[in-house]
Image (tube, rainbow, N blue to C red):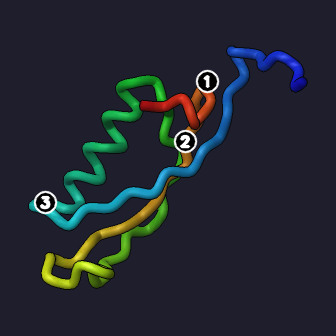
């Protein structure tokens, strides 16, 4: 059995971000701002890359990136 976890302990997680609809970069910015508003502190963001779609090819190109966040809940418990 693992020891109890300190609920005040901050954890680092990495979240992939991407969009191929509308204002692609705007949606990624909105996602980062929404995490900050919910107490998930975005500490770093990657560069953004434009990529071709995979598997379903009949769709717009994607903008993809990632961010590093600090949070006080276990990443698997995020909705």
CB within 8 Å, label 1 to label 3: no
Q: Which quadrant would the C terminus be assigned to in this image? A: top left
Residue picked out by circle 1 = 72
Mark number, residue 69: 2
Q: Position of residue 72 (x, y in %)?
A: 61, 24
Residue picked out by circle 3 = 23
Residue at the farthest left position: 22
* Residue shown at 32% from the left, 81% from the top: 54
How far apart are the alpha carbons under marks 2 and 3? 23 Å
Q: Residues within 10 Å of mark 3 (few under 14, many from 20)?
A: few
Query: N-terminal of the two: label 2 or label 3?
Result: 3
Q: Which quadrant would the N terminus be assigned to in this image? A: top right
Q: Quadrant of residue 56?
A: bottom left
Q: Where is residue 78 in the image (x, y as percent from the top left)?
A: 48, 31
Quick one: SS at disc 3?
Answer: loop
CB within 8 Å, label 2 to label 3: no
Q: Where is residue 63 in the image (x, y as percent from the top left)?
A: 29, 70
* Residue shown at 24% from the left, 60% from the top: 25
How far apart are the alpha carbons under marks 1 and 3? 31 Å
């Amino acid at each position: 059995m693992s020891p109890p976890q300190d609920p005040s302990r901050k954890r680092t997680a990495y979240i992939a971000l991407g969009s191929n609809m509308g204002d692609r970069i705007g949606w990624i910015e909105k996602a980062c701002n929404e995490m900050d508003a919910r107490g998930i502190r975005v500490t770093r963001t990657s560069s953004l890359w434009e990529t071709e779609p995979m598997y379903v090819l009949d769709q717009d190109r994607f903008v993809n990136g990632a961010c590093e966040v600090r949070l006080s809940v276990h990443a698997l418990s995020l909705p």
